[in-house]
């Protein structure tokens, strides 16, 4: 488990370095979620709409299993956000909703 955590931390740090500047992200904008077309996602809907991007970000990080995440993305104000960017938004200081401590 500790090894997985270290790998996750390295991946997250690498993603932050390569992520575009998301400081002006509008968490109140509507968002559309497109789930991966993988086998793990077969039993789930492929599309979901959210009233706010903050709710969509929380749903991706706190509710989706890891097997579904590759290929999943959010569409917010015409911009596409991959899973690494969604994680960055969730972890960011500007994230407006309470976080699930176990998923952080």
Image (cartoon, rainbow, N blue to C red):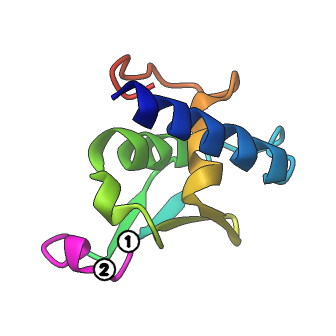
Q: Which mark is residue 22?
A: none
Q: Which residue is mark 2?
A: 38
Asked if residue 25 is among those painted magenta in the image, a careful observer would answer no
Kindly check if marks 1 and 2 are in contact, taking CB atoms under 8 A apart as contact: no
Point out residue 32 in the picture as x, y percentages from the top left corner. Answer: 48, 66
Specify the quadrant of the image occupied by residue 27.
top right
Q: Which residue is at a point 19% across and 70% down the rendered structure image?
A: 44
Asked if residue 39 is among those painted magenta in the image, a careful observer would answer yes
Residue located farthest toward the left when viewing the structure as drawn: 43
Point out residue 76 in the picture as x, y percentages from the top left corner. Answer: 63, 62
Q: For numbered disc 1, what is the local secondary structure?
A: loop
Q: CA distance from mark 1 to mark 2?
A: 9 Å
Q: Nearer the viewer, residue 60 or 3?
A: 3
Give the magenta-colored segment's residue range: 36-44
Point out residue 46 in the picture as x, y percentages from the top left corner. Answer: 31, 77
Task: Please give left or right for residue 85 compared with residue 33 in the image.
Answer: right
- Mark 2 surroundings: few (<14), some (14-19) or many (≥20) residues within 10 A: few
Residue located farthest toward the front when viewing the structure as drawn: 3
């Amino acid at each position: 488990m500790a090894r997985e955590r270290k790998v996750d931390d390295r991946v997250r740090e690498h993603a932050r370095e390569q992520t575009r500047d998301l400081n002006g992200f509008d968490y109140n904008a509507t968002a559309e979620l497109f789930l991966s077309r993988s086998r793990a996602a077969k039993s789930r809907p492929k599309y979901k709409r959210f009233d706010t991007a903050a709710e969509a970000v929380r749903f991706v990080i706190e509710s989706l299993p890891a097997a579904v995440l590759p290929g999943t993305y959010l569409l917010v104000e015409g911009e596409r956000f991959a899973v690494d960017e969604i994680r960055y938004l969730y972890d960011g200081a500007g994230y407006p909703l309470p976080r699930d401590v176990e998923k952080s």
